[in-house]
Image (cartoon, helix red, strand yellow):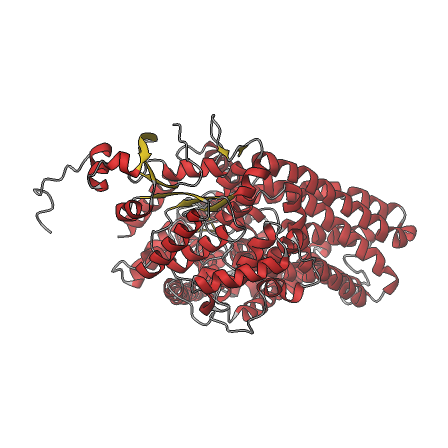
Amino acid sequence: MDLDVPAGSFFGLLGPNGAGKTTTLSMSVGLLRPDHGTAVVLGHDVWSDPVQAKRLLGVMPDGVRVFDRLDGAELLAYTGMLRGMERAVVDQRAKELLDVLALADAGRTLVIDYSAGMKKKMALACALLHGPRVLVMDEPFEAVDPVSGSLIRDILQRYVLGGGTVIFSSHVMEVVERLCSHVAIMAEGRIRTVGTLAEITGGRELEDVFVEIVGGRTATGEELSWL
Amino acid sequence: MTGTFLRLKLRVLRNGFRGKPARIVMFCASIFLGLWFGGFGCIALVTAFYPDYPELAALIPPLGGALLMLGWIFGPLVWFGVDETLNPSRFALLPLPRATLVRGLLAAALLGVPAFATAFAASGLVIGAAIWHGPVTALVTLAGVVLGVLTCVTVSRSVTSAFSNLLGSRRVRDLAAIGLALLAALLGPLQLFGISAAQHADYRQLEGFAGVIGWTPLGAPWTIGVEASRGQWGFALLKIVIAVAFLLLLFRWWMATIETAMIGTVSEGGTRRTGSPSAPVARLFGRLAWFPANRDGAMAVREARYWWRDTRRRASLLTFSVIGIFLPIVMNLGRTGFSFPDGETIGTGPLPQTLTLIGVGVLGGLGVANQFGFDGSAYAVHLITGVPGKVEMRSRVLGYSVYIVPMLLIISVAVTALAGEYAELPMRLGMLLGSYGVGLGVCLLVSVFGAYSLPETSNPFAVNTGAGMTKSLFALGALVSAVALTAPLAIGAVLVPGLWVWLSLPLGLAYGAAAIWLGVIIGGDAIDRRGPELLAAIMPRD
């Protein structure tokens, strides 16, 4: 597959379960070594020039834990120090992020005891802390309540307006339709279609386009009659 | 219903092997080892009934059986881990009566290499009884052996289940530490007795001891056949009653602990702590603020926090602290406080003492042998950030040593104080720290090249199917090679004992530091090259 994410775009990677979204994103941020091929972030190859590339990236993986036996503030402080940031900057940004994401109330609760939505917000905070140029997120809106979801959307939109690039995977069509400037639909490990949102939908509902490209439902209503 | 559990276990085992040749090799190796030890035990137990040597029947079944059972109790806690293929909490939502669940879990636990090896070994008793004492005695012996094997499996399950409950709850973790210490303290006198008995071969004394053991639940099931072979049918019946009663008690205890484990996984309140809203970085460093406030310092601090906050790591720390304190003390008691009527003392001489110190030091390093497995998928954070391998390794050494080095200091002071030879303190310090460094250096390499995933459960002793063998092999390999690498220290202590009192500390420190440095360099380089592969190895997929 060959995928080009334009700088400054809000890019949605769509696909059914098992399409290879997580695999693709993992390989592009250096978590999974590809058999062949490259991933380039703003001119820096992730696999041959990892230090520069990883400095520009903010990553929010799905199904991957953070160091969750720290509390929220500790985890952010740790992430900041890990990124080699100044102590004062870490303190200030961490507090701000905790306040904005409504995580400050959790106090000294360990992240492992957070609810699923809080964990997502925490992971977002960790990815944003060092002010990356590119944000790669795997399923950022899964298990997030509507209030937190809209908060995350606002933050991401502001981030893109400020010149950042966001690429995220999802299978929630409404979110993609509302947020994204660019969309790629993949299935069975291949990119099926890619372009700006307007190009791909052509005025139709994104869900209809998606089902048509990926292959539609087969249930006719005869099954599950015992329900 | 029990059959369903057995089939489930077999299915899970088989699926675990799919596409994992290394696992199959490990499994075959464990079968081979099981056959080896089982066969050896079987032959030993057959000869126990040889009529020409009646004293064998008085000694081997109770002592061997009790040792076996002790192995089943302590083995999983300190060494193998527990195969949690069928994790009780996964059945929490099914409408199963507890008795059915426990029966099924027991049956599934019996279906494993250790249980088969034990049964194989114990079958020697039945064979011996059948050869020399006729079918009726053999049948009674068989009943005893079945009871014994069931007790072994049940006791190991219930003990680990109880311990995981204790360690899983943050409130009673101190209690758990004390409990573990007490259990190990029980081992101390037994070990002393074993050493003295082995050295003196005083069969009268040993026979009395074996007789007592034979009446405890540890030895009762194994000696039922012996009583029967002597025609003491009343005693045999009494021992059957003891064994059955103990087994039933264990069942009740296990059921209770399973209940707690099943509920305990759902929620655990009381962690919502409120503290002064100090700055995040200051909060992260906390009492460890003497580490530099930069990336390396933060990583070491995080590692140190994890050694206490992660129950699995805490379990390994506590286990080491108990072994590390008791082993040298037990070996040293033989020198000052435990002498025999004929004036002979045990455990004297520089070599056993030196070896004990080296063993403890190397064991101290063993904790990091699967340090990445403890992190699981969280290690991805370091990979995303692009942490250099050497920094990774160095910070882990520092974070772990925050606990172990003070512990080693305490051990050497305590042992010296017990022995009363304060001039030998630098010697002990040098040996302990030097061998700790070597153990750490070796285990750093093992942690990169032999990393394996741990299941995400509340049980700190849980390992994946077949991983118990992997864990043991890697640990054993690391131990053996580390002990071999400390040979210069041991040789120095034996060749020039007088001089060594002073040379040991500087030489030991230098030697240990060099070993750690090598481990950091080589291991760090390996991490730089194969970070994603390491992550894939420790991802808890199954």
Q: What count of labels does the image hold? A: 0
- Residue B194 image point, x, y percent: 66, 58
Residue at the image position 90 percent from the left and 54 percent from the top: B502
Say which quarter of the image contains residue B182: bottom right
Residue B126 locus on image (x, y percent): 45, 48
Residue nearest the observer in this picture, B65 or B258: B258
Quarter of the image where the N terminus of chain A is located: top left
Q: Residue furthest top?
A: A36
Front one among B10 and A188: A188
Does residue A6 appear to the left or right of B189 in the view shown?
Answer: left
Residue displayed at 58% across by 33% down: A49
Q: Is residue B132 left or right of residue A186?
A: right
Q: Is residue B484 above or below residue B412?
A: above
- Tell me where residue B134 appears, x and y as whole percent: 42, 48
* Residue B256 to residue A172: above or below: below
Q: Is residue B95 left or right of residue B486?
A: left
Q: Is residue B129 visible?
A: no
Q: Nearer the viewer, residue B515 or B330?
A: B515
Instruction: Depth check: give the residue in front, B124 or B31.
Output: B31
Picture coordinates of residue A94 (x, y %)? 53, 60
Please indicate, yes or no, whether residue A68 appears anywhere in the rendered image: yes
Q: Is residue A96 above or below residue B454?
A: below
